[in-house]
């Protein structure tokens, strides 16, 4: 991503009509996260911190949906340096 030192992961989810993009960036320092999604025309965006990563979801979906997707992201523990992410419903776990 422009201005970033580390690469970002980009995941795309679609139901065939609309799609959302999930961007996952490495981030070490914590900062205050937005509590509400932003609506930009027909698109919504929301960012949240998950562990030491910044997760940003953008797409033509209701604001609640992008917030829920961002909040559901979790490390899968299966990627390089445990940086792979998936929604909790898809992430392996107990």
Image: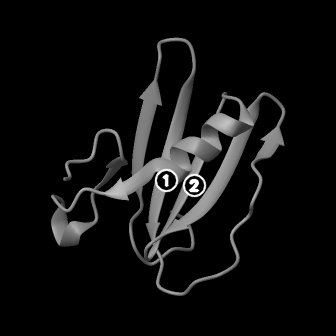
Q: Is residue 4 above or below residue 55?
A: below
- Percent position (x, y) of residue 81? 20, 72
Q: In this view of the protein, which residue sits in the foreground, 38 or 94?
A: 94
Q: In this view of the protein, which residue sits in the foreground, 49 or 5?
A: 49
Name the residue that disc number 2 marks.
Answer: 56
Residue 58 shows in the view: no
Residue 71 shows in the view: yes
List the single residue furthest toward the top.
17
Q: Is residue 39 above or below residue 47?
A: above
The disc at residue 49 is none
Graded by Cα atoms within 10 Å as few (under 14), some (14 to 19) or many (20 or more), the crowding at tag 1 reads some
Query: Residues under labels 2 and 1: Cα distance?
Result: 5 Å
Q: Is residue 29 above or below residue 42?
A: below
Q: Secondary structure at mark 1?
A: strand
Q: Secondary structure at mark 2?
A: strand
Callouts 2 and 1 close, C-beta under 8 Å: yes
In this rendering, position of residue 75 left or right of residue 19? left
Query: Which residue is located at x 44 percent, y 31 percent?
Result: 13
Query: Which residue is located at x 42 percent, y 48 percent?
Result: 10
- Percent position (x, y) of residue 54? 52, 67
Q: In this view of the protein, which residue sits in the foreground, 87 or 7?
A: 87
- Percent position (x, y) of residue 43? 73, 34
Query: Which residue is located at x 57 percent, y 73 percent?
Result: 3
- Percent position (x, y) of residue 86? 34, 47
Name the residue that disc number 1 marks.
Answer: 23
**Residue 35 picture quarter:** bottom right
Sooner in the amino-acid sequence: mark 2 or mark 1: 1
């Amino acid at each position: 991503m422009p201005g970033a030192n580390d690469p970002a992961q980009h995941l795309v989810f679609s139901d065939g009509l609309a799609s959302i993009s999930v961007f996952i960036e490495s981030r070490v320092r914590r900062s205050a996260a937005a509590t509400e999604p932003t609506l930009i025309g027909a698109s919504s965006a929301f960012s949240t911190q998950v562990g030491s990563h910044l997760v940003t979801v953008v797409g033509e979906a209701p604001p609640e949906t992008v917030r829920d997707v961002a909040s559901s992201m979790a490390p899968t523990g299966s990627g390089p340096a445990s940086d792979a992410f998936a929604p909790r419903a898809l992430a392996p776990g107990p």
